[in-house]
Image: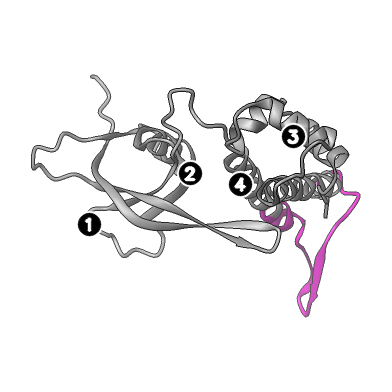
Amino acid sequence: MTLVRTPEALKDARATLGLTADAFARIVRVEDGRTVRRWEAGEREIPGPVIVILETAMGYLDSIKLIDQQLEMLRSEKMKRGETTPAGRIDQTAADIERLTVSRKSLVEALEILTRQPADDGSDRVHWYTLQRATPLFDPSQKDEWTVPCELSPEAALAYFAKHEGFGEGLEIADNDGSLTEFVLEKREVLRRRVGASQRLSAGKVVDTYLVQRRHCAP
């Protein structure tokens, strides 16, 4: 685990994450980069929450680098994993690559959420969005609910679902005219809970609800 408890370690971690002092200041909600530079110069004590954010981010980054090394070895066949069964030896390399790829994607998304900077227009309060089928299918082969934490707007959440959850034609908020729609989008508060050196996110109370439909392409 990468510790960020000294001014030098803070400066190194910020540089590793590719953040300027001003950008990091916006993430941790302090006035400007001068405060960050005072921490790095040892003129002020580094606040505990800042340490937690940086150590969590560096932990994500270290895990991503480790997975990249494992993926490189598996794909180059420098490392193979398998299981011996009565029917013979089963190569598990492909399954390991898939599992590691999924884990890497989750870590990258978590790092992006943690280091996301607020919008310049002040609309920086993120929310937890849940997209649900208005009428569940109750089919194990198909999902009825999708979630994404820490998006700035319902439009951004729908863009995420369209890109990552297979809604290739796109999703849009429907006119509230009483007609039936396929989906409902819930906007919820984001609850943050510190667990050790990391921060856990969960959905809070519902703030707003939107009717959602698949985007209609012009003929």
Could you say which is closer to the camera, residue 11 or residue 45?
45
Distance from the alpha carbon under mark 3 to that under mark 1: 43 Å
Inter-mark Cα distance, 4 to 1: 30 Å
Q: Is 151 positioned to the left or the right of 68 in the image?
A: left
Dot label at residue 120: none
Mark 3 or 1: in front is 3
**Which residue is disc 3 drawn over?**
17
Residue type marked 3: Leu
Which type of secondary structure does the marked residue at label 4 adopt?
Answer: helix
Rendered image: mark on residue 110? 4
Neighbour tally class for label 4: few under 14, some 14-19, many 20 plus, Cα within 10 Å: some
Q: Residue furthest bottom?
A: 86
- Mark 3 or mark 4, which is nearer to you? 3
* Residue 135 numbered tag: 1
Residue for point 69% across, 64% down: 196
Q: Quadrant of the C terminus?
A: top left
Q: Between disc 2 and disc 3, whose residue precedes?
A: 3
Q: Is residue 17 above or below residue 2?
A: above
> Going from the N terminus, do you reach mark 1 or mark 2 first?
1
Mark nearer the viewer, 1 or 2: 2
Q: Amino acid at mark 2?
A: Cys
Residue 14 in the image: state x and y as whole percent: 76, 34
Q: Earlier in the sequence, mark 4 or mark 2?
A: 4
Q: Are marks 3 and 1 in contact (CB under 8 Å)?
A: no
- 216 displayed left or right of 49: left
Residue at 57 percent of width and 36 percent of height: 29
User: The residue under label 1 is which amino acid type?
Assistant: Thr
Residue range corresponding to the magenta coloring: 75-99
